[in-house]
Amino acid sequence: MSLSTGNSDGKSTSLDSQEYADLKKYIFWLIATLAPLTAINIAIAILSDSLTIFTIAVENAASLILHSFNMAAVIVIQRRNSFNFPYGTGKLENFSSFLYSIIVILITMVIINSALNRYLHPPATINLGLAQITLVLAILRAWVMVAWASRLCRRYSDHSPMTHSYYVDLKLTLVLNLSVSAGLLLGLWLFSEGQIQAAVTVDLIIGLSVVLYMFYCAIGLLVKNFKSLIDLPLPEGDQHKILKALVADFDTYEGIGNFYTQLSGSTRFVQMELYFKETTTVEEIENLRIRLEERLRVHFSKLVFHLIPLIQKP
């Protein structure tokens, strides 16, 4: 996560700012293309009486809520001095995914109830030809957005978790839409052969499969982002690695003060007090800080590290 490094280097800050400017543009086009597609999905779901298209339409509506929240989050992150915050604004990004997972879980419950009612009272007919229209549009949109997100991930190697989430989510959406389209083509063929109830059953099975897939992904997002939203103490093994890094430079400081550590998602925050002689120069302290951080980053890919120098009184 690019905002959690605590790096005040001007070049790094500029790169972070540019990534979020690009991400803001990306989210804008996600919303601009999804809004009309959602409206089309709702209309076709009503006209075709397809549970699958209804499921996709509801998921699109939930995604619009998520994208809108993400847009607001990016605007907050881009505010003046946001990229100089020592601990960044990463939790704002994690909360958007957490909120989305809650919404999707609630939606899946409603759709499963609708599927059970449809199983007990199947419709007399169904129009799966209309369903293909919205799926073709969805596939084209997902393909373009996956390519765009992939380019952003390559451009910013230490990219935001929001950027990576969009890449993974849109890639899965593309595969899902292709699978659903293939399944509904089977249903359309059955309908053309006069097997209307078989076509209704295929639509029901595909719709339930999409719902279960949404539920599975939402549970994974819920657990992952919940862990990121709470702070935990560092595991004992991590504490040993910190002490080992300190022992390697035991002769450059006089004593150890307080340690302040926490685990926030996959980011480790380490702040330590070290005592020095009055004759120790600022350059020597800075060199020690650099060595300690380099040793810790060998073990911790996401680290916020601060050294607090104190004078050892006689």
Image: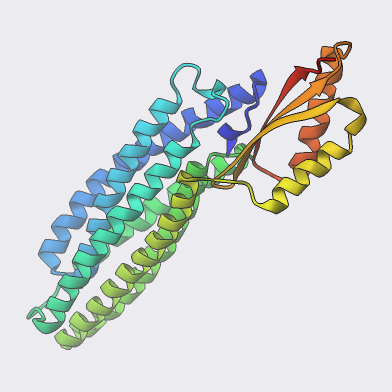
Instruction: Write down the quadrant of residue 291 in the picture.
Output: top right
Looking at the picture, the colour scheme in use is rainbow
Answer with the quarter of the image where residue 134 lies. Answer: bottom left
- Near-viewer residue (114 or 266): 266
Query: Which quadrant would residue 312 be assigned to in this image?
Result: top right
Image position, residue 197 (x, y; %): 15, 86
Q: Is residue 137 visible?
A: no
* Quadrant of the frame with the C terminus: top right
Q: Quadrant of the N terminus?
A: top right
Q: Nearer the viewer, residue 50 or 292?
A: 292
Residue 276 horizontal side relative to residue 221, left or right:
right
Q: Is residue 175 visible?
A: yes
Residue drawn at the location 64% of the way across and 21% of the way down:
8
The extreme front residue here reads 314
Number of dots carrying numbers: 0
Q: Position of residue 38 (x, y in %)?
A: 23, 51
Q: Residue at x 66, y 21 (%)?
A: 11
Residue at the spot 59% in from the left edge and 22% down from the top edge: 14
Name the residue at 28% across, 74% down.
208
Where 194 sits versus 80, above or below? Answer: below
Residue 25 to residue 127: above or below: above
Work out which residue is located at the far right of the displayed protein and give it: 251
What percent of the width, then of the height, locates residue 227? 48, 51
- Left or right, residue 79 beside residue 43: right
For residue 211, above or below residue 72: below
Residue 292 horizontal side relative to residue 236, left or right: right
Residue situated in front as seen by the camera: 114 or 227: 227
